[in-house]
Amino acid sequence: MLVGFPGETEDDFEELCEFIKEHKFDRLGVFQYSHEEDTSAHDLADSVSSEIKEYRAQRLMQIQEDISYELNEKKRGKKYKVIIDRVEGEYFIGRTEGDSPEVDNEVLISAKQYVRIGDFVDVIIRDSTHFDLIGEVV
């Protein structure tokens, strides 16, 4: 989603917030408008302050954080195929087949359970955070 496009009003932004709450996206990125050369909007007056853009971006991400947590909680007790990407501290870090590296949810698996980096393993989700899943190998 883009916030702070020239001419964006508070009503426009509130409508966007309601749209996101209604449609509950699995994943959502939020970007602040900035002038880019060779675009049709480049010459428009930047009528939304940087402070308001920042506030709106943060507000949308807060809405999405709540949605993401709700969706992650629904994954508890379910089994997913997970590819193991790396080890960090006490966890193997992986992602489900539907998640992209570096931008989507990660699956944390206790390093007490041994798995190999690059392997696919079946994982039962036992817990979740706003943007990650916590599971164990089955």
Image: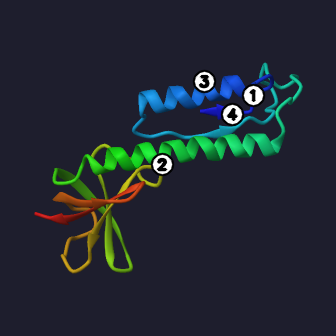
The answer to which of marks 1 and 3 sits earlier in the sequence is 1
Is residue 121 in view from this perspective?
Answer: no
How far from the left and from the top, in percent, is residue 129?
38, 59
Q: Quadrant of residue 95?
A: bottom left
At x 43%, y 28%, the residue is 23
Q: Are marks 1 and 4 in contact (CB under 8 Å)?
A: yes
Mark 2 residue type: Glu
Q: Which residue is mark 3?
A: 15
How far from the left and from the top, in percent, is residue 132?
37, 57
Question: Mark 2: few, some, or many residues within 10 Å (few <14, many ≥20)?
Answer: some
Whole-angstrom CA distance, mark 3 to mark 2, is 18 Å
How far from the left and from the top, in percent, is residue 68?
41, 46
79 lies left or right of 84:
left
Q: Which residue is mark 1?
A: 5
Question: Mark 1: few, some, or many residues within 10 Å (few <14, many ≥20)?
Answer: some
Mark 1 residue type: Phe
